[in-house]
Image (tube, rainbow, N blue to C red):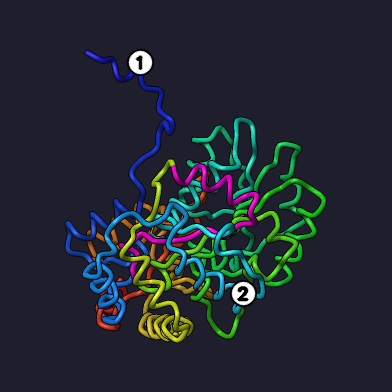
Amino acid sequence: MIHFDSHIKSKLPGAKTTIFTQMSALANELNAINLSQGFPNFDVSPDLIELVHKAMKDGHNQYAPMQGLPELREELSEAFSRNYGLKYDANTEITITSGATQAIYAAITTVINEGDEVIVIEPAFDIYAPTIRMNGGTPRPYKLQGEDFHIKWAELRRLITRNTKLIIINTPHNPTSTVLSKKDMEELDKMTRGTDILVLSDEVYEHIIFDGLKHQSIAAFPNLAERSFIIGSFGKTFHVTGWKTGFCLAPEKLMSEFRKVHQNVVFAGNRPMQTALAAYMHNPENYMDINLMYSEKRDYFLELMKSSRFTPLPSKGTYFQLFKYDRISDEPELDFAMRMTKEYGVATIPLSYFYSDNYDNKILRFCFAKTDETLENASELLCKI
Ligand code: GLN
């Protein structure tokens, strides 16, 4: 009989199943409208589906190369150079991963060792801190300021110690829907210049940015790019989160180390999807205007919610919209989110989940990557609260 408790030292004591899985399960169980976990509920392009069929029928069913399919890496290289002005070498500086989560895991594991510190900007996507800890590192949280969730760089800078190894940025930002400006990127450049601090730039929502704002990719800042991993997601751009296909870009020195980790985590990503995505991505018209589609959804959702007692916060990118509910209740976010799912039939995510101190400001995150019908039905319920 193995004594599991004494034999197995938990890598993540106290960790629970993520809120996304919990809330989606609760929504399914109660037949509630699920605006919690971020995923689109509308159809994927039939052309893209057809390309997957074709890839499978054509026999592209065995392992992809460890680095990812060359055609797809070429497409990414072209797209980044066209969109942001920096050419990543498809052979040595781009790797296709099993989703952005795996790419983030591999990037953090590549550079973080015992005793290293990582600056994490909160509210933060939930996988950064546990991954840092699993590698013996320590997250150093910085709280975004004000209702527009901005960075005060002079304050953030104070978190730097001689152990600071990495800073993680995320733009457009999940969960707040804010975006970093050119000025922010220049501040990041100034702050890291002359140091050994690396940057992990989570850009999975690069194509979902609104109101004429321009996505500030690390790839538009060559000095920063030299010290950075960029993480991207086909799931977000092509409405196929279930395909778990993403990518990482980094200068050759970082990428060669990244691949050592990557090949031991998954070896390689899914082959037929990569074949299909390479063909589909070849035409930028297939994705470059998803920002318009999503900004229309955001506007429609806000219009539908106008007569509710929820107060919207600005959403500049991603497919999330924050609402304050302080005019409705003073319950903590998690309690209110649970009650709203059970009693009113709409599931959301409490913002407090994304803070290491569970900072509670009566704000919920709603995913609007949904059909008009879903948004109409959800807001009808929400307007009754
Ligand atoms: N990125 C999505 C979200 O924020 C889903 C994450 C997940 O389920 N792991 O909701």
Marks 2, 1: nearer the viewer = 2
Instruction: Please name the residue that numbered disc 1 is placed on.
Output: 6
In magenta stretch: residue 357: no
**Residue at x-position 35% and y-position 64%:** 241
Please tell me whether mark 1 sits on a helix, a strand or a loop: helix
Q: Who is closer to the viewer here, 363 or 173?
A: 173
In magenta stretch: residue 248: yes
**Residue at x-position 76% and y-position 37%:** 162
In the image, is 160 to the left or to the right of 108? right
Instruction: Please name the residue that numbered disc 2 is placed on.
Output: 81
How far from the left and from the top, in percent, is residue 242? Answer: 31, 62
Type of the residue with mark 2: Ser
How far from the left and from the top, in percent, is residue 302? Answer: 42, 81
Q: Who is closer to the viewer here, 87 or 237?
A: 87
Judge whether residue 353 can be spotted in this image: no
Q: In the image, which residues are magenta?
A: 240-263
How far from the left and from the top, in percent, is residue 144? Answer: 62, 58
Q: Is residue 18 above or below residue 190?
A: above
How far from the left and from the top, in percent, is residue 369? Answer: 36, 74
Estimate how packed mark 1 is, as few (under 14), some (14 to 19) or many (20 or more) residues with alpha carbons within 10 Å: few
Ligand 1 is found in which quarter of the picture?
Answer: bottom left
Tell me, for residue 115, which label it has, or none. Answer: none
The picture quadrant where one finds residue 216 is bottom right
Q: Main secondary structure of the magenta part?
A: helix
Q: Tags 2 and 1 in contact by the CB under 8 Å rule?
A: no
Type of the residue with mark 1: Ser
Q: Is residue 2 above or below residue 209?
A: above
